[in-house]
Amino acid sequence: MKVLLDTNVLVAAFGARGFCFDIFQVVLAEHQLLVGRTVLQELERTLAEKLVMPAAQVAEVVAFVQEHSEVVAPDKPEQWPPSDPDDRWIVAAALAGEADVLVTGDKDLLGLGAPAALRVETPRGFWEMLRTGEGQA
């Protein structure tokens, strides 16, 4: 399964090493991780500015994510969701990479009804999806 993890999931994975880190590990081990250029930029900025992670550690995290994922760089943003231009690029990356699921904690992406070609799940919803075998080939 192709899985795009949103910035907030990756930040939680590397900032707290809890539930989102478990999801990150499962995706790396059993699925194909997709990441958009916008997500990488947001990840770098958030780790440095909000988590005040040292620059060398930020660079290691970003390099690790890039090395273990398919980086998707869409040509233009999607029109959905209407509320956040950055989210439009994330959705565009998920669609361009043919993601089966976008995992996010972003309420705008979760609550507005995603395009039909894209399943959007919370980290908990994605975990349940995996646990029940839903979405497996």
Image: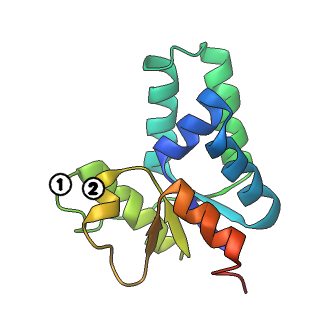
At horizontal 17% and vertical 61% (from top left) the residue drawn is 82
At horizontal 31% and vertical 49% (from top left) the residue drawn is 86
Q: Position of residue 125 (x, y in %)?
A: 53, 63
Query: The disc labelled 1 sits on which kind of residue?
Result: Ser
**Disc 2 marks which residue?**
108
Quadrant showing the N terminus: bottom right
The relative height of residue 115 versus residue 62 in the rendered view (above or below) is below
> Can residue 120 be seen?
yes
Comparing 60 with 132, the one in front is 132
Please say if the residues under marks 2 and 1 sit with CB atoms less than 8 Å apart.
Answer: yes
Residue 50's image quarter?
Answer: top left
Query: The disc labelled 2 sits on which kind of residue?
Result: Asp
**Disc 1 marks which residue?**
83
**Alpha carbon separation for disc pair 2 and 1:** 7 Å
Numbered disc 2: secondary structure: helix
Quadrant showing the C terminus: bottom right
In the shown orientation, is residue 93 left or right of residue 81?
right
Residue 30's image quarter?
Answer: bottom right
Nearer the camera: disc 2 or disc 1: 2
In the shown orientation, is residue 80 left or right of residue 106?
left
Numbered disc 1: secondary structure: loop
Q: Position of residue 29 (x, y in %)?
A: 82, 59
Label 1 crowd (10 A; few <14 / some 14-19 / many >=20): few
